[in-house]
Amino acid sequence: MRNLLANEALDQLFREARTHHAWLEKPVTDDLLRRLYDLLKWGPTSANGSPARFVFLRSREAKERLRPILAPGNVEKTMTAPVTVIIAYDLLFYEKLPKFFPHNPGMRNLFAANPQLVEVTAKRNSSLQGAYLMIAARALGLDCGPMSGFDNARLDEEFFSAGRECEGCEQEFFPTGHVKSNFLCNLGYGDPSKLYPRAPRLEFNEACTVL
Ligand SMILES: Cc1cc2nc3c(=O)[nH]c(=O)nc-3n(C[C@H](O)[C@H](O)[C@H](O)COP(=O)(O)O)c2cc1C
C-alpha cells in the first residue's frame, strides 16, 4: 500500500520548486552527491540500460574548463553554483545489458546492430535520468538550474575526449569518445530573493486529452 505524499512534500518537489540562477554560499558535499545518485539511479530506463553518465564539476579548475563553452547568459550562474553536473550519455551503455537486463540476453545484440536505436535510446533515457536527478535533488533539499545553452560538441571534446584516447582518465566511460553531453544542471541552495515571478503552465485541458 503506497501513501500519498504530504502536500508539503509535493510543494517541495513541484509546486514551490523553482529554477534557480543565484546561489547562497552553502556548499554541497560529496556525501550529498552520492546520496543524490543513490536515489536517482532507481528511476526507470528502457531495458534498465541506465545510459546516463554524470560529471560533477565542483573545482575552480573544472569550472574554468566549462566557462568558454557556455552561452554568455549562463556563465555567471554556472561559475557561482556550488556544483554543475554534466548529464551525459554513454553510447556503449548496451555493453552492460547482460548484467542489468539478464532476463533478455538478446538485448545487447539488438542495440549493437543498430546505432540509430542506440542514439535515440541513450538520449531519451539520459534525459529521463536528468529529470530524476532534479527531482531527487529537490527531495534532498537542493535547488536546480538546468541549462541547454552551451556548445555540446565543444563540451564533448573538452570533457569526453571526443574521438581520442585519454591518458590517466579514471572512469571507464571517459577514454574513447563514446560519451556525449545532453544538458547541464547547476546544483546548490538557491537565493530566493533573486527569483523572478513564476511563469504559468498549460492547464489540463490545454496539455492533456483523456481518450
Ligand atoms: C532542459 C532545460 C534547458 C534549459 N536551458 C536553460 C538555459 O540555457 N539557460 C537558462 O537560463 N535557463 C534554462 N532553463 C531553465 C528554464 O527556462 C526554466 O526551468 C523554466 O523557465 C521554468 O522555470 P521555473 O522552474 O522557475 O518555473 C532550461 C531548463 C531545462 C529543463
Image: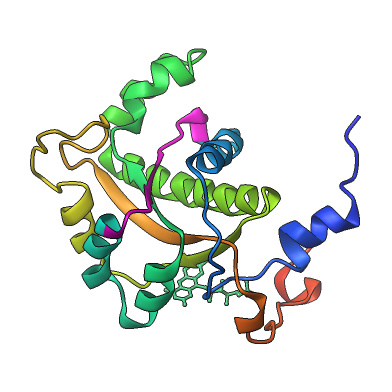
Work out which quarter of the rendered image holds the N terminus and state it. top right
Quadrant housing the C terminus? bottom right
Where 24 sits versus 94, above or below?
Answer: below
Residue at horizontal 53 percent and vertical 49 percent from the top? 128
* Above-or-below relation of 87 to 171: below
Residue 58 visible in the snapshot:
yes
Residue 106 appears in the rendering: no
Direction bottom: furthest residue: 197
**Toward which corner of the image does residue 141 lie, by quadrant?**
bottom right
**Residue sitting at x 37%, y 69%:** 79
Magenta span: 46-60
The image shows residue 113, relative to residue 98, as above or below, that is below
Quarter holding residue 188? bottom right
Give the answer, above or below, for where 181 lies relative to 41: below
Give the colouring mode of the picture. Answer: rainbow
Q: Is residue 1 magenta?
A: no
Q: Nearer the viewer, residue 166 or 180?
A: 166
Residue 62 placement (x, y as % from top left)? 27, 55
Residue 174 in percent (x, y) is at 23, 38
Q: Residue at x 73, y 62 (%)?
A: 14
- Relative horizontal placement of residue 173, taking residue 149 as reference (left or right): left
Residue 50 colored magenta?
yes
Residue 120, position as x, y percentages in the image = 38, 48
| 102 and 137: which is toward the camera | 137
Locate residue 109 relative to residue 158 in the image: left or right. right
- Please tell me how many numbered marks the rendered image carries: 0
Most foreground residue, 174 or 192: 192
Q: Position of residue 208 (x, y in %)?
A: 74, 67
| Residue under the point 47% across and 62% down | 186
153 and 202: which is toward the camera: 153
60 horizontally vs 42: left or right: left
